[in-house]
Image (cartoon, rainbow, N blue to C red):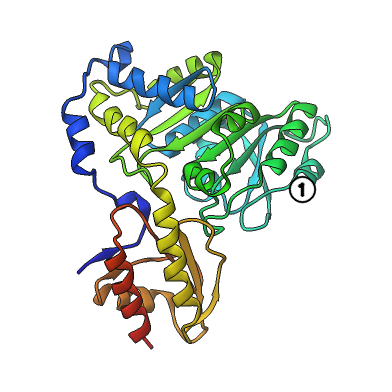
Amino acid sequence: MIVDLRSDTVTKPTPEMLDAMFSANVGDDVYEEDESVNALERKAAGMFGMDDALFCPSGTMTNQIAIKCHTVPMDEVICDESSHIYRYETGGIAFNSGASVKLLYGDRGRLTTDMIEKVINPEDVCMPHSKLIVLENTCNRGGGSYYDLDEIESIYHLARLKNCNLHLDGARLFNALVETGDSMEQYGHFFDTISICLSKGLGAPVGSLLLGDIKTIRQARRIRKVFGGGMRQAGFLAAAGSYALDHHIDRLKTDHLHARVLGETLESLPYVDKLLPVDTNIVIIKLQDDVHADVYVERMRDNGILCSRFGDQLVRFVTHLDITPEMVDHTITVCKKLR
């Protein structure tokens, strides 16, 4: 048995999702004539009470488009030092938008209003304009941690007061929502733009959506084109995304349960120094000093369990819709026998 816990991006379409893809009504999306893409964009925008949406190949693209929509060269982006836009998008903020970055050190990736307010630059010819605040929810490197909506509302009011735009990297936002019970419409009210991934816990093979107002999404469509993201008969992929939004949100709770069960075992093992709190579907352990992460990951692979080195002495496991209770039990058995 091979159990792939490297990421929730490794999922395969379910038979029902494949049926939806095969029956998709498609056209040329660059001409805005693909009805399956149009339907997905309308659906997602409506769920969050926002005006419009844009379907893109990846979450990196939707984030980078949003940053370019909200900034001009010599502006500054405020984000956590562990955030995806800074760590895992290949320096795209500088390359694509010519903006600088102000890094903060939040609580497992989560920023507070006070932290942000202290670093917003005054009007000074020597300083970049503090123009965009980016939050990530859930926080990948924070072990799937998520925000309290009251804090988001407070940050929203600060952004308005300081004339800053507010973007949400919501690659795993639905994982947060099924835990908190917060409404999508509230998120749509607080953020200028939201990026949501369809290809992680929701299980679609490809795709991310950028949500915003009509003017921003019109600009985003032009930026997507210059980034090379204008796809043609993309409706086959969009149909998978629509199916995921209709059928795969509530089941994320199962992934969270699997993660907690796995985390409880890992925390008790002698080679584990620390377990980050398991809030959603991400389990991160810190190994004891005498156990090297690369060696541990390789030994797990030798036993049919795929996981990821996630930094110095850190290892990440991510549960998803392809993981069954039997796979969780098998993973626990393997973890226990390693010494």
> Percent from the top left, x then y, of residue 295?
37, 79
Image quarter (top left, top right, bottom left or bottom right) of the N terminus: bottom left
User: Disc 1 residue type?
Assistant: Met
For the image, the number of numbered tags is 1
Neighbour tally class for label 1: few under 14, some 14-19, many 20 plus, Cα within 10 Å: few
Mark 1 lies on a secondary structure that is helix
At x 51% / y 42%, what residue is drawn?
173
Name the residue located 57 percent from the left edge and 65 percent from the top edge.
277
* Quadrant in the picture for the C terminus: bottom left
Tell me if 202 is positioned left or right of 287 in this view: left
Q: Residue at x 57, y 37 (%)?
A: 168
In the displayed structure image, the side of residue 318 where residue 49 appears, left or right: right
Q: Relative to 264, is 290 above or below?
A: below
Instruction: Please state the horizontal and vertical placement of residue 9, each as a whole percent of the image.
Output: 34, 49
In the rendered view, tell whether residue 4 sits above or below residue 18: below
Q: Whole-percent x and y of residue 138? A: 54, 48
Image quarter of residue 275: bottom right
Relative to 166, is 114 above or below? below
31 lies left or right of 158: left
For label 1, the residue is 115
Q: Quadrant of residue 78?
A: top right
**In the drawing, does residue 113 fall left or right of residue 190?**
right
Does residue 315 show up?
no
At horizontal 34% and vertical 38% (from top left) the residue drawn is 247
Instruction: Tell me: residue 147, above or below residue 191.
Output: below
Can residue 246 be seen at all in this image of the molecule?
Answer: yes
**Observer-nearest residue: 256 or 195?**
256
How far from the left and from the top, in percent, is residue 115?
77, 48
